[in-house]
Image: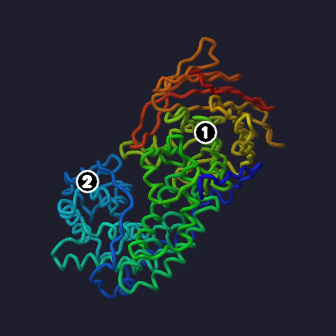
Amino acid sequence: MSDDTPDEIEEGKRLIRHGGSGGLSLAERVSERFRRLAWRTPFHALRLRGRHPLKLIAVPEDPFAGDPRRGNALLDERMAFRGESIAFADLDFAKPNWKPPFGEHLHSFAWLRDLSTVAPRAIGAPIAEALMRAWLAVHAEKVSEPAWGAELWGRRILHWTAHAPLILSSSDLVYRSLVLNTLARGARHLDRAADKAPAGVARIAAWCGVIAAGLLIPGGDPRRQIGEDGLTRAIEQAVHEDGGVAARAPLVQLDIIMLLTMLREVYTARRLAPPAALSAALGRMVPALQGVCHADHGLSSWQGGGPVRPERIDEIVAATGVRARPLRQARDWGYQRLAQGDAVVIVDAAPPPIARLAAGGCASTLAFEMSDGAERLVVNCGGARAAIAQIPQALADGLRTTAAHSTLIVGDSNSTAIHPDGTLGRGVAEVEQARQESATGSRIEASHDGYARRFGFLHRRQLLLAADGRELRGDDMLLPAGKRRKSAAAIFAIRFHLGAGVEAAPTADGMAALLRLPSGKLWQFRCRGGVLAIEESLWIDPDGRPVSTQQIVVSGEATAGGETIGWALKRAT
């Protein structure tokens, strides 16, 4: 897609959430359990036997840089990830003593990217080989979870092959043979496990591993063809026509883009053209990703993800080779982007993802984020799935609630239920939206039914961003929902979580607040109806760490006939 491709602004849209509260069925869980138990049988061990490859056909490039801080920790013989740091001597692969995100990072061998970023082969290879030997001693022959999970094997094949110089530089022929044989065994395992991986990023990662093995291990042409067919199906199931992922999580969007770009490098190493489905998916997904980025290209915080720094987004987009304008209106992805002057507003205008497609989803319907140039003015707390290990689980759970997002909340209740097991339950089932572009600016109107059953109200939000980007006007309405009108009044609060470093001070009349951005820019917030207060909040930064911030809260009580609260954010300097 070129830069001059026109946006297609749709006048109206209704998004409906089907099967929202259902995760895997009991039959599906039982079937999955038996399948995993079958991995331990002698019959499955026989399936993994085959020819021992002597070498890789080619070594692809890794198109992405690693994290220098994590890489330097490896040089100090420590594995560090999301606040956890464990010395090599204390890494026990037989008896894991780490949290699941750390284990996934360790087993995926994504840390090879970090190591290669800070050290040449002569320095990095002994470190990589020591960790590889420790992993092989426990997992090379024993098929078990989580190490042999299909998603992790897919990621591991991509990283082992891209960083083969770090793990295959040894003169120990027995060790080199063990690495290559384990790689081949993992590929045979994936041949049968890839299509059983959970739909979404896990299945895409698994099929990427199948294809990479087919391209890089001798005799892999049949595997490559099967893998390409499987990847095409996995992409069709996980990615909407507008380029957004069904899980509705920008971090998942970013992850899939990186996986597909790594796989494309495998084709490049073999001087082969990638399949059309891969290239087409990247062409759709990159504009959708950019659509949920702020003016500085930094990623906004949605569906459990924290922000990602602009330079990282720029690196990833550049690696894809896709040049496109940010997607402004997504038909199925559900995020609406209003961009005028220096201001960008990103709105969640769709139901939350269904339970089986997203772990750790959030009740964020009709929330928004807003930036003025490189500074974030209004944000969501974010980071439920990207926070450091030291954040208590109760706080991480709280980051998924409606109250942790910049939207209206009724009765201190989530617009979509969050179950104790982490899945999303009943609530928002339908969102109606309409959008208009005119000389005066960009306007969006959307409503959801998340409070209709419990409180008898629809929440409708109207946002108008002026053509110069210096004013955002909003109306939040609670409208009676058909015949299910409640007689009792309902308490509501509209929350505006402020960006890091934004200082809020109330005006004398108590109906407005002055907002000073770190650069010195001034914005004024004013509302009519409700009571304005400034309270403490927090924001999860790009490192997954909580930062103390402030929030504006407009609260009140809605009668059975409904309520309308008008508000405006206006640039003062």
Give, as a three-letter code, the residue at label 1: Val
Nearer to the camera, 534 or 322? 322
Q: Is residue 452 left or right of residue 111?
A: right
At horizontal 63% and vertical 56% (from top left) the residue drawn is 21
Q: Which quadrant of the figure contains the N terminus? A: bottom right
Q: Is residue 538 left or right of residue 90?
A: right
Q: Is residue 87 above or below residue 107?
A: above
- Residue extending farthest left: 171
Disc 1 crowd rating (10 Å Cα; few below 14, some 14-19, many 20+) is many
Q: Residue 475, which numbered label?
A: none
Farthest right residue in view: 483
Q: Earlier in the sequence, mark 1 or mark 2?
A: 2
The residue to which callout 1 is attached is 345
Q: Position of residue 398 (x, y in %)?
A: 51, 41
Above or below 11: residue 23: below
Query: What residue does disc 2 label?
Result: 118
